[in-house]
Image: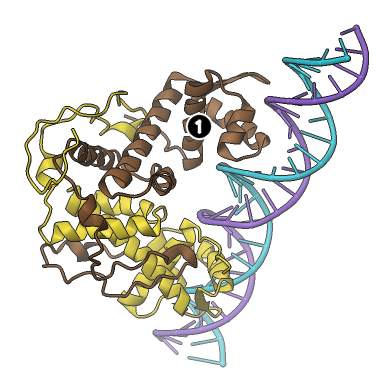
Chain colours: A yellow, B brown, C cyan, D purple
Amino acid sequence: MHRKEQLSPTHEMYLKVLYRLGQQNDVARVRDMAKGLGVNPGTVSAVLKKLEQAALVHHDRYGIVALTSSGTAVAECVIRRFETIKALLTEVLGMDVETAEVDACMMEHAVSPETVNRMERLVGLVQVGQVDLTALITSPIRMKGNRCSTCEMDNVCQAETEIKSEVPPKRTTLSKSQRN
Amino acid sequence: MHRKEQLSPTHEMYLKVLYRLGQQNDVARVRDMAKGLGVNPGTVSAVLKKLEQAALVHHDRYGIVALTSSGTAVAECVIRRFETIKALLTEVLGMDVETAEVDACMMEHAVSPETVNRMERLVGLVQVGQVDLTALITSPIRMKGNRCSTCEMDNVCQAETEIKSEVPPKRTTLSKSQRN
DNA sequence: AAACTATGTTTGACACGTCGAACTTTATCG
DNA sequence: CGATAAAGTTCGACGTGTCAAACATAGTTT
């Protein structure tokens, strides 16, 4: 079974935007994509050519753009990854939606299928109320080494080497094994 | 406060490898980096030039390569991200180490500082035994939409459109931005 | 239909990260 | 020391993704 070329993050983004546009506007045009991607129309034209060669989109000159069935499948896959990561960030880690979306949009191209599956499950558990970590995670009790909030500010990180341990034992939600 | 240029994933990788080499071998040379990065020595030479301009490494012609102090700081930051994500994947989601490392290596360039902080905290909670999700996450009970394990195999995803739901609607933050 | 405006395409240029091959230095060995 | 090997650099080339500007087409107006 020949494994297909891995799509670049860029191409995944193009497909994702195209999918969203299809949902919203029913049809998508080059200009919409350019807008949605924050990119030059000329660039869209160029990329569309490749996407068409890969049979992921249909696009006749000066016409509308549409996903093929495999393009749709890929887009849905990307969107699933995005939504899963976003949900993990907001619902499990308690991040704000804006940051979560930015992060998810970068991470969505980097996760393996199995990771997505497990993330999805974790999110499900939280949504179902079986697990609630937000309080714990966002509580003011800081753990050692937890101090990189301005990390990327200037690409310098205050992190220390000994990052682990030092949490007050305050058991809450289901814990099955304590190996400490 | 002028925010520094964001480093490319590539540059972050170069710094990370350099850091690791310094730890292991005490000194690092171009050939080591090339090996560690799976890349041509000529490429390393080229990239090193930029890294040097950015004052992240020292490198005199035909000599050894070393991180500057800011290079070291960046490398430590990247490594912290890597270790955090890896720990999340293995210890929280129960992934195998190999996959976790591959995933973490891609994701490490995509997470915001705050996300890392929270991931770190979650990992801490699990390590301390306050939380244990592995059994739940990996249990055979499959949830709806949890079905993309072969997703990237051929870039086609079996995921259905209705991936969500079946879980009590606990939040509604969804329909905020549609361009992501 | 002619003009004008929206939209889309092409072209030439560029930065990045990469390669392979030719060349240069440095190191080592006989 | 001088020859040879190992390591590093440079050079020319390439694919990707991007832009701006020139050009082409389609769609509306009048």
> Can you give x and y, in whole percent of width and height, for residue A114 in the image?
36, 58
Q: Would you place residue A20 above or below residue B76 in this image?
A: below
Residue at horizontal 18 percent and vertical 32 percent from the top: A180
Q: Is residue A67 visible?
A: no
Query: Is residue A28 or residue B154 the one in the foreground?
Result: B154
- Counting labels gives 1
Question: How far across and down, in percent of the image, does residue A78 sit?
Answer: 38, 64
- Using the rendered view, name the quadrant where residue A47 is placed: bottom right
Image position of B85 (left or right of D11) = left
Horizontal side of A19 relative to A1 (left or right) equals left
> Residue sitting at 38 percent across and 60 percent down?
A113
User: Which quadrant would residue B4 be assigned to in this image?
Assistant: top left
Between C29 and D24, which is closer to the camera in this rendering? C29
In the image, what residue occupies the spot 34% across and 72% down?
A: B159
The residue at which mark 1 appears reads as B17
Chain letter for mark 1, please.
B
Image quadrant where one finds the C terminus of chain B: bottom left
Local crowd size for mark 1, using a 10 Å CA cut-off: few (<14), some (14–19), many (≥20) = many
- The x and y percentages for residue D30 are 41, 86
Name the kind of residue labelled 1 in the image.
Answer: Val
